Structure formats: C-alpha cells, structure tokens
Image: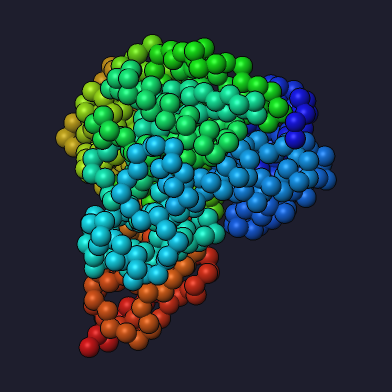
Amino acid sequence: MSTQSLKKILIANRGEIACRVMRTAKHMGLSTVAVYSDADKNAQHVKLADEAYHIGPAPSKDSYLVADKILKVALDTNVDCIHPGYGFLSENSEFANACEQNNIAFIGPPASSIEAMGSKTRAKEIMAKANVPLVPGYYGDNQDPTFLQAEAEKIGYPVLIKAAFGGGGKGMRIVEHAKDFLTALQGAQREAIAGFGNDLVLLERYVNKPRHVEVQVFADNHGNCVYLGDRDCSLQRRHQKVIEEAPAPGLSDELRKEMGEAAVRCALAINYRGAGTVEFLLCDDEFFFMEMNTRLQVEHPVTEMVTGVDLVNWQINVAAGVALPLTQADIVLQGHSFEARIYAEDPSNDFIPCSGTVDGLYIPATSEFVRIDTGIKQGDEISPFYDPMIAKLIVHDDSRDAALSRLSTALEQFHLSGFSCNVSFLHNLANHQTFKQGAPDTHFIEEQGDALIAVDPAIGTISKVIAAFSHLSSLSQAKTDPWSSLTGFVLNQAANIVVPFSDGSIVATKLPNGFCIHLNGVDYTTTGTIENNHCEMFINSSKHSCHVVNAQNTITVMYKAQQTQYELIDKHYISEHESDALPLAAPLNGTVVKHLVKVGDNINKGDAVVIIEAMKMEYTLNAPHDGVLISYCFAEGELVSHGDMLAIVDESEAQ
C-alpha cells in the first residue's frame, strides 16, 4: 500500500503498547480501533480507542493471536492500517501478508523481512553473508534430539537452547551438563509451541559475561536506512530485560559507529522497512549478532528520549509511503535515558508473576524528564493470561548520573498496591554502586542474589509505624460516640490500644493529637493525616510522606519505593504456617501443562511432579517429601487458581 494518507488505524494489541500507539495516532489525526478479549473488556486501551470490538476468550491463543478475527474487525470497520505493537502477531509474516492482500497497510516490515529474521537459523545465514560476526552454534533444521545432543557436545557446554522463532526469554534454556540436555530441550520446545506456535530450536555456545547491546534501525520504501543510536539492555532476569538505557555506556565512538553500520547492513540485506532492532552480544570490544527484532521494541522510549524522534509517528508515515525525515548525519543523541519495567511479580519469590486488582496506583508527575507508559488505572484487574509487565517508567537528563538519580527518585514516587511488584527491586538496582559505575554484564542480577531484594531495616521500621498509625486512625474515624472512641480505655490508666498484626501485635497509647506507638522497645510519637490514601505524618518530629491502602484485613504501605503489606488478625485469620507443607499448591493462577510422574509411582523429595504455565512462563513444582503420588487434582490443560492443590503425595505409602 503506497497511499500518502492513512486515516483509520486498528491496534492489534493490548496494555501499555496499545495505549502508547493510540496516543501518537490520535495526535496525528487518525481514528483508532481497539480489539479486546473477555479479560480486557474494561481495559484502558479499550476506553482510549474511538471504537472497540470483542475478539474472543481471555487466552491469547483464542483472541489476540487469531489473525482472522482481527482482520475481520479491520475489514468491517474499514481501517486502512494495522499496528501490531510487539508480541502477539507483530512478527507473524502470514498476518502481514494478509493485511497487504486486503489493501490494509501493515505498520511493520514486509512479510519477506519477517520471514528472513523470524527463523533464527535463516537469520544467521543472512548475517554471515552480510559479514556480521556470529556466535558458534547449530542453526539447521534437523531437530532429532539425539542429533541435537551430539551438536551440543561439538559446541561444548554450557550450551544455550533457543527457540528459533522466539524472543523475550521464552523457549530458552541454558544447559551446563550433558545429562540435563534432553529435559531442557523438551522444556524449551514446549514453551516455544505455547508462545510462538513452532518448536524449532537452535543451539549456541553460551557466551560468558557478555553485555546485551542493541541498535535501533529505521528504513523506508525509498532505499533510505538509518540507525538511531544504541541501547544497553544487560540488566535482565530470566533472560528478560528490566532496566534499559540509551546510549549504551562505555562504547568508543568507533565501536558505536561500527555496530550502527553493521545493524544497517542487516536491515538492507533483507530489504527492511520500518522500525527494527538488531541485537548484539558485546564482549569487550568484540560483538556478535544475536537476532533482529522486526518490530518496535518494548524499550523504544529511551531512544525517543535521546533522539527527540517519535518512532510510532515514523512507523505510521513510513507505512503510508513517506520517506524518512532525517538522514544519518541529522541524527544527534542528546543526554541519557533509562527505562524501568514495572512488573506485577514477586522478586523475593523468584520473580513469580502476580495477578489481582490495582487497589492503589500513584505515579510521579510526568514532564520533559519523566514519562510513564502504562495501560492500567486504579481499580483495573491484572490478568494471569498475559505478560506481567504493566508499566514503563522512563526518565531523561543531561548525563547518565543525572538520569540515574532521576530514575531513583521517580521509583520512590511510583506506588502500587493490590499485588506484589518489582518497584523496590528496581530501586535497589538503580542505586547499586556497580550499576552506577556503568552497565554490568547480563549475569549481574543473578549473581547479586538476595542483595537486590533486601529491605533497609530503617525503612521497614518506619513502614510498620505508618501501618500501625493507619490502623489506629481508621479505628478513631470509625467510632461515632465518645465512649466507643476510647479504645483500650481503663480507668486511671493510659488508653492502650493493640494493633493485631499477624507477625506480632504491637501496643499504642492514645495521645491528645495522635498516638505513641511502642515497637521493639522504642516509642514513636505520631501525628498526621491520611486522606485519599495519601499519608502525611510526623514520627518523632520527622515528616514522612507515603501512600497507605487498607483492603479487608491488610494494610499496604508504599514508602520510599518499598511496598510492604501487613496482615491483621481477625476471626477469619488463618496462620500462614498452615500452607507451609503445600509446595504442590499452585503459586499463581495458570494452566497445567504437563504431569511428570505417573500416579502410583514412588517419588523422592524434590522430584519434579507437575508443570504449570502462567503469564507466558513455565513453573515446575516439586515433591514436598518422599512418598507415593496418589493423584493429580487437575488434568493437563485445565486452569488452576492461586493456592489450588495440584497433586497429592502420600508419605505413609512410601515403599
């Protein structure tokens, strides 16, 4: 399609990227169309769009991944272009072809370019011809497990198994020893089928201590192609990025230019069009091609912040046949930018995804220095069916040090409640001395262990005092007569009040203008107000500001980037220890994908029993003790809720 004028756009995606694309489209004067699943009926991207249409049940395989449903909406609503966002159908060549065949501009590269890079094996062949360095590995079509294991032996362990049509850390396994290869291969193939519909894998030598540096490229239909700087994406957990920055620190001008020009050669080699990202492994001054993502990247905002370019605007214009507005010489990087990905997950529990209701959402003020891309509002539901990333916090300043300081401050002002999130983890990361000195390698988070989830004891103490003050204030507000308001009243004695926290009750004394809270042998005099969950209070004459959310029998305090939840005991309270012996209970909402042991078999403590999938990742649950597997509580393919027992192991029947 070569029209110079696009008027109506369908965004074939959800969440923050759908909202982000709509904002630019509306600014350009385009009418917007959203699609949504059962789980997203009340989602923000639906509310933001001019029109919205239902496309199926919550699982993405029945909705956002069904090209025919989306195309039908596009044809019925007479849109003239489709933006796929990232994930879902963004790198589906058949979908791109179908759009073009129906005279709908696909806002992305031609199907032939997607196909060339969609298979990592073919991509490696093309890059070799383009004289781009490659990591040693096997990129062929032979998928016989015995053959692949033999190839792994040739490459030498550790070996990386990677889904040929995958991305985002899904369908990927690191294998340290030969004995673990076949199990890892099966797991990678299952994730690849679930996430990308194709279980083809490739093998690579696992490069130790690399940095992950990528280059943003952009090409039009007129033979022009430029690179818009680079990004460092080395801070990763489970092979998924958590903080990205632009430009990549520590690169010489010569190396930066060499990588940029190599990325342009990649794009030209496949007749590319639109926004694309070429990813490299950087080892000192040596770099290796990893893959090319033929779409807009999650971390594209940091490039926008340092270039002043709206990449979605460029995407839409290029899809309409417009030439690139800038040449390579025109592109100048200004300052430094960071992006922190806000996930609904529990960093203290191996970053397990979480779902629930957004009970509280309070964000820093946006400005030329601070940008927030999100698809949620307070009261929204975080579904277990999709990726747990719910927002992106992006900052910009004149230097890396200034931008990193701004990121730290903004994270302290980003408050979420209703489920666990990674804001505190990101804050610890942003303030880590090693990261402050420059980008570390991709193993940094893994090697730091518990250091990045540690809680400052002083912050923990203040948070608990704030939680107690919130509870005491709610008691005072709930009483309407003078006798009821004297909680803890004893004649001729101080009015003591018990705050029944589940981890140990604490005592407070009512004061004329507040409370004296007794905690760990220290008295804290507190006064202040809580209005609309915003708390302004003095603790021993020091002022503190935070947000506090009371929900049922819990109090969530969001203070200095730390989200802490306190449980209150009441008649419905169940001790947390009652669940200590239930490691075969579902740790989150998800789907049972595989039973690993036959009913009736003897098993040992720690043996893998069942695998569940949630938010696009697999989780293996292990036997709590030696015994016999009596039964599975759910069949393969069935949905489970958090806390559901998945299998029963009887210790008494162990032989």
Q: x%, y% of residue 582?
A: 33, 67
Quadrant in the picture for residue 213: top left
Residue 646 visible to the viewer? no
Residue 309 visible to the viewer? yes
Residue extending furthest toward the left: 521
Give the vertical position of 336 relative to 168 (above or below).
Answer: above
- Left or right, 38 with reference to 241: right
Residue at x 45%, y 75% (from the top left corner): 633
Give the quadrant of the N terminus: top right
- Left or right, 598 with reference to 505: right
Give the vertical position of 59 relative to 473 (above or below).
Answer: below
Residue at x 32%, y 78% (from the top left corner): 649
Which of the pair 337/411 is nearer the observer?
337
Give the vertical position of 60 relative to 543 (above or below).
Answer: below
Question: What colour-coding does the image apply?
Answer: rainbow
Quadrant in the picture for residue 313: top right
Q: x%, y% of residue 280?
A: 37, 36
- Left or right, 359 with reference to 289: right
Residue at x 56%, y 31% (from the top left corner): 275
Give the quadrant of the C terminus: bottom left
- Left or right, 595 with reference to 366: left
Which of the pair 608/39 is nearer the observer?
608
Give the vertical position of 294 relative to 56 (above or below).
Answer: above
Quadrant in the picture for residue 155: bottom left
Q: x%, y% of residue 21?
A: 63, 31
How many marks overall? 0
Q: x%, y% of residue 327?
A: 55, 16
Residue at x 59%, y 31% (from the top left corner): 274
